[in-house]
Each structure stands twice: as structure tokens, then as C-alpha cells.
Amino acid sequence: MDLLTSEECLLIAHKTFPDKDKSNLILLNVQLQAGSKDLMGYMGEYYKLNLEIEDVVENEKHNLEYFIKCLPRNNQPQREECERKGVFRKESAIYSQLLPQIQKYATKKLFPKCYYSRNDILVLEDLTIKYRHLKPSDNYTKEHYKVVLEHLADMHASSIAWEEKDKININERYRDVLVELLLSTGNSWYMTGVKAIVFLASRHPQLQSKEAQYFINNKLYNLLTKAEELVKPSKTIRNVFCHRDTWDRNILYQFPSESSTQPSACCIVDFQLAKYCSPTLDVLFLLYIVASAKVREEIYDECLEHYYNSLKSHLIRLGFGEKLPITRENFLAECQRTRLAALIIWALTEPQTKMSAAVSNRLRSEEPEKFDFYLNTDRSELLIRVMKLQPGYEETIMLPIKELVDYLMANEKLYH
């Protein structure tokens, strides 16, 4: 195995049993298996690691399971993109420096434990032992959203508590770590996505009026680049540590029993896009990326209320009862201000998250250079190819385009 040395594997085992004397542990066997193709990420490759160790003093053997996330090994363009953006450096620092401090003030398990990290690899607790993704046959219910919102509220409140107790500002102390990797005009993926939104909008059958086409061709591109301003630390609400990537595959649920359909808890993974910013971005990104437009409309107000009540409860628990750092009015007004960022992220990510794993994995493995071109230079050919390969894809990715353009045409003056 060339991912980790025997010495590193022993170090991982020792971190799993910190009370044991490291010199008493012997590594008996190492197994590394590629992760499910369904988990293939845009910013890494996944593996399962199994270590068999023995404590020679206590005469005990242990089988240990871990989840590995590493830089792409077989796809050079993808690897170069990850290295260029420094995603593993960022996530390693978040797991080692920020999350343990925030966890001190939380009531829920906020993240998988990190046992080892380098700038090209993370060895994490295997959450699938106790948690799981929703199955394709499972449907999200209001309870699923509420569990995630409670989790986010706990994390947000705990980050405020950490700042207050230690007299720090997370953004100032970790400015070099919490860089914007997604919605930045310096990110070719984002700017290519902006061009793709304009491309799709110009083709949308319900946006063919002279007024809509003029708006799309002359104003849309510049308005879409405003997302960069909306995800900077807010001047109108207390900023918090945000995950900023709460889509379906980054949320694992815990259930009371095998037959249960309603979750009792969740855990969130992938902190590459984490940022110090408005808490509304986590709330809105969840509702815009995971929920369908129809479901979102039905549950939107109730979910905002549920999140805020949960946040308020945690803030009171943490000693902020006298003067809440975030009021309900403040939170709801901020949701209005940052709604455009949620609409943009939905339109940007829908073409990738709704592309079937079979299609995206095939394109990435068979045409890595072209796939990199699609992601970071021009997506129009990719979108047309997938429309032909995947029934229903065009209708799905056009939904956020229509809602985004309609919103901007009606509210253009807000963003000048």
C-alpha cells in the first residue's frame, strides 16, 4: 500500500487508543479498498482502510475501520486542480484546528473524528458504522431537514461561544485557512458555471421574450458575479463558522433502528468549502440544494422558524440569554439579503449533482482532460451531451435557471 506507511498506520492506531502505550501495538494487517463509485467526489478520491492491530501486553487484537479521503491519484487534471486550490490543506487545518474547538461547546457530534492528516490525505472516522446516507428509495421528509437545521444551529451557536469565551475572531485568526474556494471570481469553476447559467438561460423555452433575452445577454453575467460579495463576512448579522456545502451526499443520518425512516441525528462531512460568514448561507443552501422547488415552497417558512428556535435555544444554553447575538428579525432580514447566493449556488450545482454517477464517472475516467475543460473552461458541450444521455436532465437543470432569472429581473435594483 503506497497511500500510508506502516509507521503512519501505527500512528493512526495509537490515536484511536491514546491511552495505550504505542510500543505495545503491533500492526498485523492492512487492507485498503476503493470507496463506492457513488461517493466519487469532485475534489478527491475515497477509500476504506482496515487495520488489524494487537496489544502484545494485554494480548488483545482489534479490527479498526477508517474512511480515507485523498488527492486524486489516477486523474492528473483533477489532482492538479485540487493542489492548485489547496483544498486538502484547508480541510486538514479545519479538522485539526477549528472543529475540535467548536465541538467543546456543542451538544451534538458535529464532525467525523480525524485520526491523521497530510496535505494530500485525511484519515477519518468511518461514519457509516453508525450513520448512513439516505437510500435512493428514501424520501426526504420535513424531519430530515429539521435534524440538519438543528445540527447547523448547534455548530453556529458553538462557534459564537468559542469566540466569546476565548476572546477571538475566527475570521481574523484563521484568515489564511478559511479562504473562499467556491464563489470567487478567481475560481475558474465558478466563472465557468456563471457562463453555463447564461448559456442555459438563453436556451430556456420560457425565457425567449425580447425583454428576457435582452436581460440575459446584457445584464445576467455581471449580476451572477455578485455572489462573491454575498458570501463574504456579513456586515448585517453576527457571522459564524459555516459548512457551506450541505448537499445530500455530505449529510449522513443516524436512525434509532434499522426499520426507522425518521432520523434521530445527523453528521456532516466535507469541510473544504467552510467559511466564516452569515449563518443564513448554511440554512438557505440546504433548502435550495437538497429540497425540490415545490417542497421548498411548502416547508420554507417552517424550516427558517425551526432553525432560529434551535439557534436561540443553544445561545441561551451557552449563556447568551440576556442579549442574543442574533435576533429573529435580524435572521429573517439576512435570509432576504442572501437569497440570491442560494439561487446562484442551486443553478451552479444542479447540473453536477443531478448528473448520474454512471455518466459523470464515465466521462471523468475516459476523458479526464476534456472533463477538466468542461469544469473549468466551458460547460456548454457537456450539458448538451448529458441532456442526450440522461432522460429528464434538461428539465431538471432548467428549473433553477428560470427561478434565478425571474428573481433577478424583478429585483435587479437590489444588487447594483
Image (cartoon, rainbow, N blue to C red):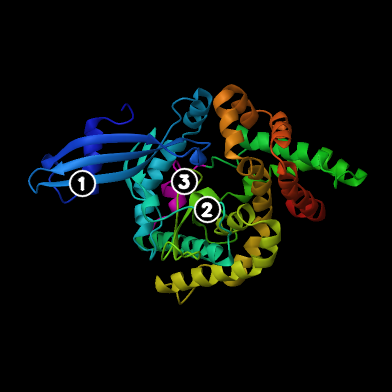
Residue under pointer 2: 135
Residue occupying image coordinates x 41% and y 73% = 317
Magenta: main secondary structure: loop
Q: Is residue 143 above or below residue 95?
A: below
In contact (CB < 8 Å): disc 3 and disc 1:
no
**Closest to the observer: 393 or 123?**
393
Residue 108 rendering spot, x and y as whole percentages: 39, 63
- SS at mark 2 in the image: loop
Does residue 171 show up magenta in the picture?
A: yes
Residue 15 rendering spot, x and y as whole percentages: 24, 46
Q: Seen from this angle, which residue lies furthest bottom?
A: 322
Give the class, few, some or many, for how many residues have Cα within 10 Å of label 3's Cα (few <14, many ≥20).
Answer: some
- SS at mark 3 in the image: loop
Residue under pointer 1: 62
Does residue 225 show up magenta in the picture?
A: no
Residue 346 visible at all = yes
Residue 245 visible at all = no
Q: Is residue 145 above or below residue 285?
A: below
Q: Quadrant of residue 219 in the image?
A: top right
Residue occupying image coordinates x 66% and y 49% = 346
Instruction: Return the disc, 3 or 1, that comes first in the chain's sequence.
Output: 1
**In this rendering, position of residue 196 left or right of residue 207:** left
Q: Seen from this angle, which residue lies furthest right?
A: 210
**In this rendering, position of residue 74 left or right of residue 105:** right
**Hey, what amino acid is under mark 3?**
Asp
Which numbered disc, 3 or 1, marks the residue closer to the eye?
A: 1
Residue under pointer 3: 270
Q: How many numbered discs, if any?
A: 3
Which residues are the magenta region? 167-179
